[in-house]
Amino acid sequence: MSETIKLRKGLNIKLQGGAKPEVETLPLPFKVALKPTDFQGLTPKLKVKADDLVKAGDALFFDKYHPEIQYTAPVGGKVVSVNRGERRKILEIVIETDAKAGSVEFKKADPKTLSGDEVKELLLHSGMWPFIKRRPYGVIASPSEKPLSIYISTFDTAPLAPDYNFVMKDQMGTFQTGIDALTRLTDGKVYLGIVPDSAFAKIKNVVINTFSGPHPAGNVGVQIANIRPINKGEVVWTINVQDVLFIGRLFETGKVDFTKVFALTGSEVENPKYYKTVAGAPVASIITGKLKKSENKQRIISGNVLTGTKVSNQCYLGYYDSQVTVIPEGDNYEFLGWAMPRFNRFSFSHAYFSWLNKGKSYVADANLNGEERAFVVTGQYEKVVPMDILPVHLLKAIIADDIDKMEQLGIYEVVEEDMALCEFVCTSKIEVQKLVRKGINLMIKEMGN
């Protein structure tokens, strides 16, 4: 076992509503959707139209600039609608599910007996490829690239995040199959980030790195930065821990199976626990009848409170999400606001007296508690980013569109989630994550990679 990498910087936000270690399997939802908007930088080209019948694993659309990358149906059934937004932008392909529709038959094989090209071809045709992202930039990996290595974080330190030791406890064999497939895609190594006493420590054909410390210790980008930072011209790949299961199932059964476990969390949930359903399921299928009766408006988030997306009952779960969080909206005015000596509100800067009780968990809402104002230097960002970068200077370089400075200050190392805590603690209410993506998009446009 490797030595534990101890991260000192960061912040654990203790919220009420953590999921109990119970899993309930939900019935197949009536409808499921695949959303091109979940994929950064994608220009989708449709392969289906309304009323088409599809099997699980049939291609629904592909990337205009990488046509070899297929985005496939998570379930079989009938395409009932292709929902569009402004300028006919494709927002959703909605499928009315049919358990009898069947699945496309792909090659069933032990990945250890296949070449890298054979594994890659199967992942591309089955729709598994979009689960693999590349760093820098946090976009879907290009099949023509050869990564130096592949990184997987097996734990999540975000507020109320799922416990993957619990979620994956009976699926380690399938996870190992997925790992064996990923090892064929690189001449380097597959790195696994774990916590002490993790069940993932028994996984083979990987390099184990143990981490401890506050959030964002579970972010794969933070782990990369503390193992081997990315330099200009280098490319590594990452993949979420449950997505490795999808790959493992493909090789074990020859069929796609996008079933995953979601954690329903938050202070507005009556009985927070885990639910097993298919990726792209309706939000309503998970939350209906499970929220507290409240006179206050509720904020539903696909993902966690730091990086998730605000959704409604009519929306569908995000492609990469494994969590649904429900908290109070907080759209009410509070007398004297931050000036009150509050004991029931969390504050990083000790603005409230709640800091005296460090073990307490809190009910957080979506109230911004102020408005965006001048970008001032407070030293707060540096306390929550456990990476060798200067976050304030990087953000200012992004605002100024200074590509040279962005390169020097670490734009290759970060994506939005790595600096989400900066947005949370920011006195100036700066939308840090939007700025980071703006900088990344500028780099892709100007550098061409």
Image (spheres, grey):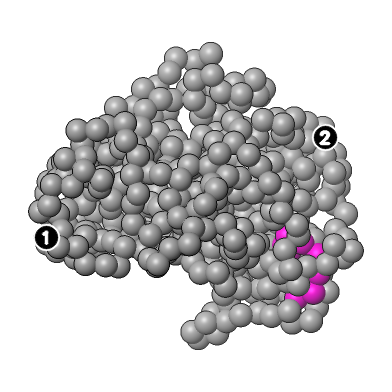
Front residue of 285/232: it is 285
Residue 239, x across and y down, in percent: 57, 43
The circle on residue 110 is 2
Highlighted range, magenta: 72-79
Instruction: State the image quarter where residue 35 is shown.
Output: bottom right
Near mark 1 (Cα within 10 A), the count class, few <14, some 14-19 or many ≥20, is: few
Give, as a three-letter code, the residue at label 2. Answer: Asp
**Number of callouts:** 2
Question: In terms of depth relative to the viewer, which is nearer, 201 or 132?
Answer: 201
Q: Residue at x 42, y 60 (%)?
A: 444
Q: Is residue 411 left or right of residue 21?
A: left
Mark 2 or 1: the one toward you: 1
On the image, the x and y values in percent for residue 305 come to 40, 52
The residue singled out by tag 1 in the image is 336
Secondary structure beneath dot 1 equals loop
Res. 404 visible in picture: no
Amino acid of disc 1: Leu
| First-in-chain label (2 vs 1) | 2
